[in-house]
Amino acid sequence: MWTAAKNELKPITRLAIPLVAAFLGYQLMGLVDTFVSGQLGVETLAATSLANALFWVITIFPMGVLMGLDPIIAQALGAQKKKQAWQACKDGLGLALVFGILTIPILFYFSAQGWPWSPKGAVSEQLLAYMYGRIYCVPLLMIHTCVRCFLQAHERGSIILIGTGISNVLNLFLSVYLGGGDALLTQLKLPSLGYIEHGLGAYGIGLASSIVLCAEVSLLCFQAYKIGQSPESSSVSSVENTQALESTEAVMTLKQRWKQLIRIGAPVGGSMLSEGGVFSSSTLIVSAWAPIVVGAHQVTLQIASMTFIISLGIANATTVRVGHAVGSGDWQRARGAGVVGMLFSLAMMSCSALGFLVFGEDIAGLITMDQQVIHLAGELLMIAAAFQLFDGLQVTAAAALRGAGLTKIPLYSAIISHWGVGLPLALLMAFYVGLEVHGLWWGLCGGLCTAAFILCYQFFSVTHQALQQDLTENSVPK
């Protein structure tokens, strides 16, 4: 196993680095939008924050379903079925358009005034305005998920990174100008352009996100099309010819292929929604406490999410490498890829945990100037340091299982760990023990620890069984 792990170190690192940088770029665009919203007033800031949360809660499940393409495409490439990988991407694009069209009315429905998060007033009006601007990018977001899966399975992380870089440059300009116009440029001591005097407010910020994503998706789709239409992908390989001759199964219809994608991807979307739902619930719980506590919780959550992005990039690289190995029938290499991914993630999260312990208050001071919030956030970051290791392990182990096509295990783990252990423990320690927000974070830590244990155990158990089966089959006389 260690030989296989050593051989996987370089490929995973080469793919993980641009993916981590790209995901950090997505976070940076969110920070720019938050900055611009804050310059336009507290109502705009509140509206865009609520709208963003609502947007991701509603879109995260269909995006997760489309991430079922990860194992399908990676395993197809591992088996040298490049034409099948391109066909899976095209099937995913069709399903992405369906999901995008169906999601738009749901977003509008839950963005309307009258909901607890959108009472009548200036905030709710701007929330709806922001959603009107961003609604164009819903189908694009689904398409982006498909082409990203296709490109990263081909280990083209650099293309994804270039797309993110272009998006950040465009977003910095468009968000500032469409949101605040010449007035905001003057406020930032920049030369005015003379086209939009006061900007479009929340609608402009949302519209900027749609335009930026359109540019990025165009680039990624062009690159995916070039790869998919290349002679290697268009022609049927000798391996595919052999397997086609040996197979007695009928060719799957589009409907059957969509069912297969949904069957594999739905647990991915469910696990993402389950984990995200617990952290969203923690925010709702904290909202009943003092503003200082709410602020410290939000600051800590934002910092922890930035470090989580690092593990997410490593996890995506791990999915690809495990998928390639499983597709080629090499479970020894699949286990090695999973081990490298988990150790790599563990090493990176150990660095962030050390940074939280030593520089917690300094890091919090980069986001807020309130000394009370900074002090409390520093205490919470010490707890967050404890779950950094478990968070990195669980997301990478889940990705390794996803690469093997085992997407139901992470779903069951998320339900048991976060809803069966994490949230009850958080409520117990926060209210019964009396630790309040500190107890809440220790509970979240307990949930992540449980998830890491379950997922790591399941990955090693599954790969061990597969290796034992291969050993038994190879030892049987022919």
Image (cartoon, helix red, strand yellow):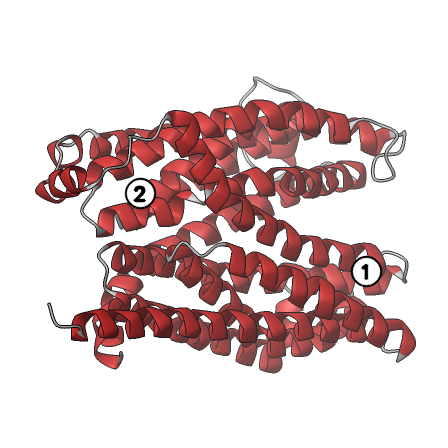
Is 88 drawn above or below residue 423 in the view shown? above
Numbered disc in front, either 1 or 2: 2
Q: Position of residue 224 (x, y in %)?
A: 28, 34
Describe residue 441's horizontal placement relative to residue 333 as left or right: right
For the view shown, which residue lies furthest in the top direction? 195
The type of residue carrying mark 2 is Leu
Q: Position of residue 205 (x, y in %)?
A: 62, 31
Q: Which residue is drawn at 56% across and 38% down?
A: 62
Describe residue 104's horizontal placement relative to residue 431 as left or right: left
Instruction: Give whichever of discs 1 and 2 has the lower sequence position.
Output: 2
Is 287 drawn above or below residue 127 in the view shown? below
- Asked whether residue 220 is in view, the answer is no
**Which residue in the protein does label 1 denote?**
294
SS class, disc 1: helix
Callout 1: few (<14), some (14-19), or many (20+) C-alpha neighbours within 10 Å? many
Q: Quadrant of residue 248?
A: top left
**Which residue in the protein does label 2 denote?**
151
**CA separation in Å, label 1 and label 2:** 39 Å
Q: Locate the N terminus and report the quarter of the image it occupies.
A: bottom left
The type of residue carrying mark 1 is Val
Q: Where is residue 125 in the image (x, y as percent from the top left)?
A: 80, 26
- Asked whether residue 286 is in view, the answer is yes
Q: Where is residue 245 in the image (x, y as percent from the top left)?
A: 14, 38
Q: Which residue is drawn at 24% across and 47% down?
A: 77
Describe residue 245's horizontal placement relative to residue 267 as left or right: left
Q: In which quarter of the image is residue 176?
A: top right
